[in-house]
Image (cartoon, grey):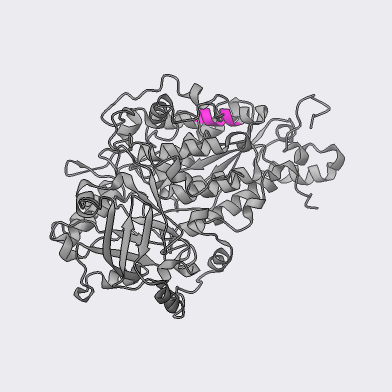
Amino acid sequence: MTDEKTGKRRLRSQDWFDNRDHIDMAAIYLERFMNYGITPEELRSGKPVIGIAQSGSDLTPCNRHHVDLAKRVRDGIRDAGGIPIEFPTHPIFENCKRPTAALDRNLAYLGLVEILYGYPLDGVVLTTGCDKTTPSALMAASTVDIPAIVLSGGPMLDGWHEGDLAGSGTVIWRSRRKLAAGTMDEEEFLQAAMDSAPSIGHCNTMGTASTMNALAEALGMSLTGCAAIPAAYRERGQMAYRTGRRAVELVLEDIRPSHILSREAFLNAIRVNSAIGGSTNAQPHLMAMAKHAGVELKPEDWQVHGYDIPLLADVQPAGRFLGERFHRAGGVPAIMSELLDAGKLDGNCPTVTGRTVAENLEGRAATDREVIRPYREPLKERAGFLVLKGNLFDFAIMKTSVISPEFRARYLSEPGREGTFEGKAVVFDGSEDYHRRINDPALGIDERTILVIRGAGPLGWPGSAEVVNMQPPDHLLKRGITSLPTIGDGRQSGTADSPSILNASPESAAGGGLAWLRTGDVIRIDLENGRCDMLVDAAEIERRKGDGIPPVPADATPWQRLYRKTVTQLSDGAVIEGAADFREIAKTPPRHNH
């Protein structure tokens, strides 16, 4: 719509503040903004009103520095001729929210949709960092479809413990094994964890936080080079300023998420995830983001488009280094440049810069080949997620970039049966059961055992918990066996180095095959053919179904009940059933409120 006074495209916020057909409503909308000093001239000027979706708070330490970064975002918005309006989003803190932060992604999405739709905002800067703040923000931006741009907060500086790099999360999983093996005491365990968090920012490993912010950039929703800048670097404030400026330009140019988030952009993100050794949590999050963007992603896309991509980033947990050096080596643009030159990216995809992917990557080659390898000289040839199915589930993934030489030699290298392994299952119903019984000698756990955890999916936990990366019992750790094959219907931390089979769908609580597995059953894992089956007669499985689905905890809060009633499976992104029906809703202004 064109404004009669200016001849320019009429902005969404003008329906609130400069509505000549409803001057009484405009007065209501304007009046209370006056009480902190903003002027009616500003709000009625036709300048873009840009929201700053503030994810930082004391409850979200990984994102807390956005409280300060927002000042530079405001400067950028003002200098570009916009009006900044900052507002809080629902806090999501991966490390601390119980029973799991996965519950909060859909809740934060819902809240942000209502804000972006129901308030006079022409565009928005999405501040992200901790794992689920990124997908929830992009899910909401796609649903409403106003101009949007992601400003990630960046990783912490590299952590060090006794002269060795201490990566957030990763150092805990590795130290946990040492503690159980008796080679580390409790005080050293705690100190190693503390040493991994030396500054503001999110995880400095390629965990879910770094992964999802890298994928936001790969999708074209961040300025080039944004994702990997450490939170404490001066460049982070400069990026905040430039992001604020660009947010205004996006409104003036009417560039919206629907113009950027195509199937080709999502396939680019899948390939980038493989090359960086990204988190397995990328699978449900990208699926959810694609669903809300109206893009069809299939579970098999992870293998068809991502499995053959080599590992290029030597970053923990799949590699050696941390986020600070990854940034100095060239970060996400350097990875994407390698993929583009190898013909593995669609360089024609548009981005929030106003330029294509290929144009953004000009002159972005890696500067440190120890950290970012050339495409033809990778750390691993095939680093993507292996997609599995069988009578235990219809879909699960395995992160192949973290398969160690020791693990491959022990389980996947039998002559004539390479990539295939059979073992006895020991089944745990939730993490409490695992922690209570893992060291029980009566279970007879040895190096040929497959650890299975169920009741950990979206319905069972509820929310899907990061519990699949189970460590072996203490007696095996003392023998130097640091990992066993593990399977589960939950997730695992993006900072974990376990080659687990996870995100199994349908989950046990939904009647998936894991519900009918029993301790002592033999499981065959066949990576060559993408199969994972319990070697149990079909008639016996049918008999076991008469026992009913293993019980799960009752709803503890109203949201848990609503979540369970509406959530889909991890293979589908664990989204709210029916929420993806709502897209580009900003096209129709909401009804007046008086």
Picture layout, residue 374 above or below residue 381:
above
Q: Could you say which quadrant of the image residue 323 lies in?
A: top left
State whether residue 242 is above or below residue 412: above
Residue at horizontal 43 percent and vertical 61 percent from the top: 393
Residue 437 against residue 42 in the figure, above or below: below
- Looking at the picture, how far across and down is residue 342, in whole percent? 40, 26
Quadrant housing residue 472: bottom left
Residue 578 versus residue 142: which sits nearer the camera? 578
Q: Is residue 252 magenta?
A: no
Q: Position of residue 344 (x, y in %)?
A: 43, 31
How many numbered discs sit on the rendered protein? 0
Indicate the position of residue 493 as horizontal and vertical percent values.
36, 53
Q: From the image, give the main secondary structure of the stretch colored magenta.
A: helix
Left or right of 456? Residue 126 is: right
Q: Who is closer to the viewer here, 55 or 267?
A: 267
Q: Furthest-front residue in view?
A: 416
> Going by the picture, which residue comes out furthest to the right?
21
In this view, 548 is above or below 341: below
In the picture, measured across the screen, residue 531 lies left or right of residue 173, that is right
Measured from the top left, where is residue 292 in percent x and y? 60, 47
- Left or right of 447, for residue 452: right
Residue at the top extreme of this rendering:
363
Which image quarter holds the N terminus? top right
The residue stretch that appears in magenta: 241-247
Q: Is residue 543 visible from the viewing direction of this image?
A: yes
Residue at image location 33% in from the left, 72% down from the top: 433
Residue at coordinates 70% horizontally, 32% vertically from top-left? 42
The answer to whether residue 467 is visible is no
Q: Quadrant of residue 146?
A: top right
